[in-house]
């Protein structure tokens, strides 16, 4: 109960804008799923709560809001369980050498999960599949799926085999600071051998999810990550005592979760009549197009994640605990990113692809404008909440067992640094589909190169002085990542504007003024409230949770009232402003 309540309170902190929206709309999400059963036709219903026919004639904002809401709810559940998972990790493994080794081994497949399940594979595959659906036959669609599955599977089996054999080399690449460590290096290499096959499993899961999303079956792909967290929590609580060292149980949990996630999606593909029969044909035109789009998409849409991996490499040279401090703060900053930005990006990509194929630039631009507005409504208050409430949130969630007050203090600094870039992280997720839906890979790749180089230069500028003067080098890594994300987002926005792809709708001045006033009022309320409360270190978890809940609810109330006073109503969200 402690874990779930704490995670729920954190969700409150980063979802202030959503809670504020409830003030004007008691029926925020009409999911229409109260009668769904996982039997017979129920599989089809659950897999397709939002169908293309249902949304075909709906206003852009209303249909997108409903679909984003469904994906957001499922993603929210996954992220809350992810936080519970991290609380369990913090309690049992803390920030010791074994924890650093596991987080390096886990970050590699987790990074690949973001690439395939939430990023580049879908960006490359969905536009091609949508074109086949629009212009081709059912047989052509099935043929594309079969050949993509076969070629992808063969490639990943080969890569996985090489990686398992070369695990020590991977450890040296991703954590060179571990090379001379007699504990962390062999432990990380051993766990990478176990976790890396997750790449094959999660990539095939990503293929299945992309197919389901293309047919507007958003729920199942969004729910699949829940299984990863359930398996990892079970591994930590139930299996760890039987392993030596206990942290090895978590590595095996990652592999088991990959199997469970893939098996979960297959029945829903079967219901659509699209269960892949893998065939290897590298000469197939569809396969060539997907591969051609996928290579730059992996880089272009996932630069922020690549930057995080580079941060891990540099953090391995910093004092013990730095990798873990960055991990915990990154996880918290990513909750609003996953719940809102990725949900919106997942929903708009199929629509943008169809609008481009139908030569409807006006609706294309309107969809992007709606997505940018929704991101700003959510990202700004979430970032402020993270900055102001960093210590209370971290204490409530993680300061138990082996996680010390010093760990919380260090994590809070990097959390604030990541929070500064939250708006940029979220904008990248919704702006990139504007290029990928048009099968334009060159522009995001060029921007990605600029952002990556900027990140490395900023790392050198920030890390050294912060480390040698204040011994907080890990904060420099987080600051550099946030700054490079703004460079990335700014260049994406400029590219869309210059090409005439995105044209902001009228009324942005009013919206920005309302957001400024609402966020200022919320920040003032949180600062005053936090200043009036003392004793976080001495309190038990339920005392921390109670006071944090009061702060969150007060901030949500102030933010919602201020938005209403600024003229923003719930109907605006459904109408696309």
Image (tube, helix red, strand yellow):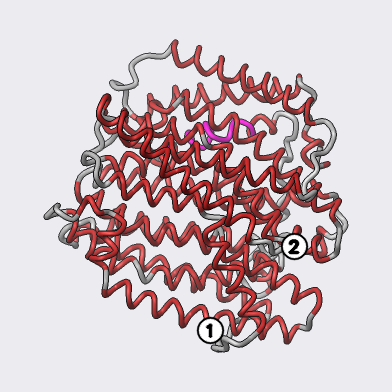
Residue 510: mark: none
Residue 353: mark: 2
Can residue 33 be seen in this snapshot? no
Quarter occupied by residue 400: top left
470 vs 114, left or right, is left
Of residue 121 and residue 514, the one placed in the foreground of this image is 121
Quarter occupied by residue 111: bottom left
Can residue 386 be seen in this snapshot? yes
Q: Residue at x 43, y 73 (%)?
A: 200
Where 12 sits versus 550, above or below? below
Q: Quick one: SS at disc 1?
A: helix
Q: Residue at x 75, y 44 (%)?
A: 497
Where 538 sits versus 368, above or below? above
Report crowding for label 2: few under 14, some 14 to 19, many 20 or more residues within 10 A (C-alpha). many
Report x, y in % for residue 271.
66, 77
Q: Earlier in the sequence, mark 1 or mark 2?
A: 1
Where 377 sits versus 117, above or below? above
Report x, y in % for residue 382.
56, 32
Report x, y in % for residue 270.
62, 79
Task: Find disc 1 in the rendering and name its residue.
Answer: 150
Q: Magenta residues: mostly which secondary structure?
A: helix
Q: Residue at x 60, y 49 (%)?
A: 429
Report x, y in % for residue 459.
38, 39
Report crowding for label 1: few under 14, some 14 to 19, many 20 or more residues within 10 A (C-alpha). many
Marks 1/2: CA–CA distance: 24 Å
Point out the stretch of residues depicted in magenta: 6-17
15 vs 481, left or right, is right
Quarter occupied by residue 320: top left
């Amino acid at each position: 109960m402690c874990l779930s309540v704490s995670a729920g309170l954190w969700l409150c902190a980063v979802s202030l804008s959503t809670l504020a929206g409830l003030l004007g709309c008691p029926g925020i999400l009409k999911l229409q799923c109260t009668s769904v059963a996982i039997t017979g036709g129920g599989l089809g219903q659950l897999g397709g709560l939002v169908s293309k026919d249902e949304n075909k004639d709906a206003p852009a904002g209303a249909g997108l809001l409903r679909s984003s809401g469904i994906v957001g709810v499922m993603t929210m559940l996954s992220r809350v369980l992810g936080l519970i998972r991290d609380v369990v990790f913090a309690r049992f493994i803390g920030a010791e050498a074994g924890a650093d080794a596991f987080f390096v081994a886990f970050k590699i497949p987790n990074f690949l999960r973001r690439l395939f399940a939430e990023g580049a594979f879908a960006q490359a595959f969905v536009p091609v599949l949508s074109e086949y659906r629009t212009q081709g036959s059912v047989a052509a669609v099935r043929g594309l799926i079969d050949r993509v599955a076969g070629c992808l599977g063969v490639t990943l089996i080969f890569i996985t085999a090489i990686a398992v054999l070369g695990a020590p080399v991977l450890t040296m690449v991703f954590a060179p600071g571990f090379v001379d460590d007699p504990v962390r290096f062999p432990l990380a290499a051993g766990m990478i051998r176990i976790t890396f096959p997750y790449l094959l499993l999660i990539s095939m899961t990503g293929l299945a999810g992309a197919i389901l999303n293309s047919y507007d079956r958003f729920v199942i792909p969004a729910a699949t990550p829940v299984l990863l967290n359930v398996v990892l929590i079970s591994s930590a609580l139930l299996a760890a005592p039987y392993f030596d060292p206990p942290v090895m149980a978590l590595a095996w949990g990652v592999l088991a979760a990959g199997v469970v996630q893939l098996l979960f999606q297959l029945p829903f593909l079967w219901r659509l009549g699209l269960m892949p029969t893998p065939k290897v044909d590298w000469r197939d035109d569809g396969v060539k197009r997907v591969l051609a789009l996928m290579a730059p998409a992996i880089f272009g849409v996932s630069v922020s994640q690549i930057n995080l991996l580079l941060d891990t490499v540099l953090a391995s040279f910093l004092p013990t605990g730095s990798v873990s401090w960055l991990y915990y703060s990154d996880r918290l900053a990513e909750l609003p990113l996953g719940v809102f930005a990725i949900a919106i990006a997942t929903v708009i990509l199929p629509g943008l692809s169809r609008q481009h194929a139908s030569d409807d630039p006006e609706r294309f631009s309107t969809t992007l404008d709606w997505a940018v507005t929704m991101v700003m409504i959510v990202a700004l208050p979430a970032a402020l909440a993270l900055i102001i409430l960093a210590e209370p949130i971290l204490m409530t969630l993680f300061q138990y067992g082996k996680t010390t007050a010093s760990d919380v203090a260090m994590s809070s600094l990097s959390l604030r640094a990541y929070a500064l870039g939250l708006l940029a992280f979220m904008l990248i997720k919704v702006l990139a589909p504007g290029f990928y839906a048009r099968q334009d890979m060159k522009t995001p790749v060029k921007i990605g190169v600029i952002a990556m180089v900027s990140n490395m230069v900023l790392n050198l500028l920030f890390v050294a002085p912060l480390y040698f003067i204040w011994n907080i080098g890990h904060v420099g890594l987080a600051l550099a990542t946030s700054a490079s994300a703004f460079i990335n987002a700014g260049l994406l926005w400029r590219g869309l504007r210059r090409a005439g792809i995105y044209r902001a709708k009228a009324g942005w001045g009013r919206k920005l003024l309302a957001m400024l006033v609402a966020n200022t009022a919320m920040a003032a309320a949180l600062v005053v409230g936090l200043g009036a409360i003392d004793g976080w270190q001495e309190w038990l978890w339920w005392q921390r949770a109670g006071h944090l809940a009061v702060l969150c609810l007060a901030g949500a109330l102030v933010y919602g009232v201020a938005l209403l006073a600024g003229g923003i109503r719930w109907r605006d969200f459904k109408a696309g402003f």
